[in-house]
Image (cartoon, rainbow, N blue to C red):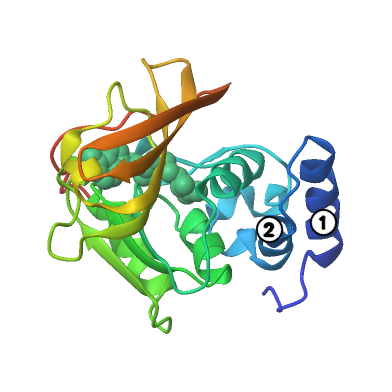
């Protein structure tokens, strides 16, 4: 059994490692230092929870590398009580980081098996809605959002998602083909205008269309 303080030293070491790789936002580093990643890991890899690597979870997907989570979260620039749409819940680790930073999170996952697992992880948490569905469609019923975070590789950012962003809002996504993507930050500057900035290269699992009901 794991207790609350399990892996505390490993978490401090993980934060130090991520800081030395260039993450400067103290709020992000603080969240990485607090969220218990071992609660989101597949049981086979729990001992490796605080290594800065991605690991397999169910349905052929992965829990993101902590550095990548920190990088995307830093670019996203979340603030207290902001509404964040997350596409690709996966294990829920990134979701937990956003919650730890005070966001209200709406997270969509297309794999039923992962969705089923993750809803039980957030049962007691009020500021989160996990939705089984296709992230390409966003969540018009809860839009507009202050922030949108895509955690799977996408070839092009759909206008549908930009339409669901508030003016002044930000969207972060790894854009490109399977294998390598560039991290992109879109700022919505007006109802029909955006500003785009590009950052480093990453490799994410692909964003797929439709849902997968396998469990
Ligand atoms: N950040 C997560 C990992 C995300 S991996 C973590 O730390 O655990 C990317 C996730 O996106 C996978 O779970 C995959 O099933 C999901 N995904 C892929 N295409 C999707 C889509 N169209 N809609 C919603 N989720 C999608």
The residue mark sitting in front, 2 or 1, is: 2
Q: Is mark 2 within 8 Å of ligand 1?
A: no
The image shows residue 93 at horizontal and vertical percentages of 52, 57
Secondary structure beneath dot 2 equals: helix
Decide which of tag 2 and tag 1 comes sooner along the chain: 1
Is residue 204 visible from the viewing direction of this image?
A: no
- Look at 48% across and 21% down and name the residue there: 182
Taking 119 as reference, is 95 left or right?
A: right
Q: Quadrant of residue 85?
A: bottom left
Label 2 CA crowd tier, 10 Å (few <14, some 14–19, many 20+): many
The reply, left or right, for residue 77 in relation to residue 25 is left
Residue 63, position as x, y percentages in the image: 51, 45
Quarter-wise, where is residue 9 in the image? bottom right
Displayed-image quarter of ligand 1? top left
Q: Which residue is mark 1?
A: 10
Residue at 63 percent across and 60 percent down: it is 38
Image location (x, y in percent) of residue 35: 64, 65
């Amino acid at each position: 059994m794991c207790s609350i303080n399990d892996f505390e030293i490993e978490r401090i070491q993980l934060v130090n490692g991520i800081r030395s790789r260039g993450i400067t936002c103290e709020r992000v580093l603080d969240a990485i230092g607090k969220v218990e990643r071992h609660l989101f890991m597949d049981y086979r890899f729990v001992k490796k929870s605080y290594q800065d690597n991605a690991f397999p979870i169910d349905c052929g997907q992965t829990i993101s590398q902590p550095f990548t989570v920190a990088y995307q979260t830093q670019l996203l620039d979340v603030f207290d009580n902001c509404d964040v749409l997350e596409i690709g819940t996966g294990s829920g680790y990134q979701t937990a980081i956003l919650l730890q930073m005070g966001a209200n999170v709406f997270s969509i996952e297309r794999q039923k098996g992962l969705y089923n697992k993750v809803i039980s992880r957030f049962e007691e948490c009020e500021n989160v809605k996990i939705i089984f569905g296709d992230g390409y469609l966003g969540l018009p019923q809860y839009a507009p959002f202050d922030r949108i975070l895509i955690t799977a590789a996408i070839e092009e950012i759909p206008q549908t998602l930009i339409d669901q962003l508030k003016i002044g809002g930000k969207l972060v996504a790894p854009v490109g083909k399977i294998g390598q993507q560039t991290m992109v930050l879109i700022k919505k500057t007006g109802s029909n205008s955006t500003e785009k900035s590009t950052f480093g290269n990453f490799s994410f699992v692909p964003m797929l269309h439709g849902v997968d009901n396998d469990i």
